[in-house]
Image: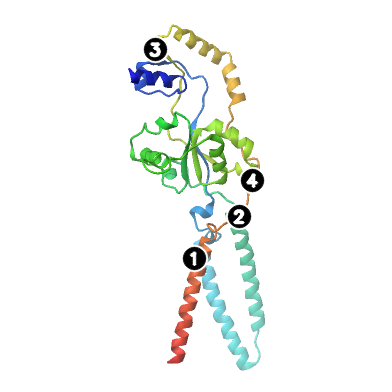
Amino acid sequence: MSTVLEMKKKTGTNCFITQERLNVVTYTDTLASFKIRFVFRQPPLPYVANIFSMPFSTNVWIAMSVCAVLSTATVNLAAKWEAKEGKCAGRMMVFVLFTALMALYVVYSANIVVLLQAPSNSIRSLSQLANSKITLAAHDVDYNHFVLQWYKDPLHQLVRKRIDPEKGEKQFYDLNDGVERIRQGLFAFHAIAETVYLRIEQTFLETEKCDLMEVDYLNSFDVFVPVRKGSPYLELIKVVFKQLRESGLQPAVTKRLQVSKPHCTSKMASFSSGLTDMKPVLIFMLYGICLSVAIAMAEIVVFNC
């Protein structure tokens, strides 16, 4: 009896088809088409790749290294020849070398600035989202507390445990808080996409709409309006739903009330940089400091010996 009452209690707000609810309700038709998705902003490119090695291809890096070694050897030879003979074009060689390095520096810096503003496009599937470092959360409404438990495969269970762990803090938020966390980045929010997009249109900057992405968790599960099983109004409701669709009223209302995914009206991305973006450079500097200390100690040892 308690199970039946619980099923009846859920029929008024939830339109998902489940095997248990078929005992007490009949599903009629879909009144409004909407999607339930994970909505998030693609992580910035420095978050998933070392952007400081990306401006040039591998062959270009190799060619630059070879040219640097040859140029250093040539300038060194020219300096020794000039000191010995008193005549040589050493200054011109140094001038040409530093001019080429300046051109490379300008090109490299321009590419780095572009890459710092570029989204990664690295997350396009549920498996990629589940294995990413992005925080996974869900809208704190009733359907999210049971649809996440439908699938028992390892991938869906991994997503569910990250949102609703048995121990620890549960990742359920209200709509405004969830959308604001999406705007801040590295946060995926499972909710009705059209509702999320409406809030995004109200709060996001134009440059923040260009990297929005959605991933399906429920495998495009359709929703239908439930009616009490054996209801005398069942056939009447079915006929009215068909009339609404055939008359064009339902598509018109859907188009007016439901917000689609925002379009990116500006190609210019917002610039932001932090320690995450500079991590490869900081690691490279640390290696350089360690190497310089090791060389200094080796010189001291050689001098004393």
Q: Residue at x 60, y 37 (%)?
A: 200
Tell me the number on the disc at residue 229: 3
Task: Give, as a three-letter code, the residue at label 3.
Answer: Lys
Q: Residue at x 43, y 24 (%)?
A: 16
Would you place residue 95 above or below residue 57 in this image? Answer: below
Mark 3 or mark 2: whose residue is earlier in sequence: 2
Q: CA distance from mark 3 to mark 2?
A: 59 Å
Mark 3 or mark 1: whose residue is earlier in sequence: 3
Q: CA distance from mark 1 to mark 4?
A: 32 Å
Question: What is the quadrant of residue 218 in the picture?
Answer: top left
Q: Residue at x 52, y 22 (%)?
A: 32
Q: CA distance from mark 2 to mark 1?
A: 22 Å
Front label number (3 vs 1): 3
Report the front residue among 155 and 79. Answer: 155
Q: Secondary structure at mark 3?
A: loop
Q: Quadrant of the C terminus?
A: bottom left
Tell me the number on the disc at residue 283: 1
Q: Is residue 281 left or right of residue 227?
A: right
Q: Is residue 262 visible?
A: no
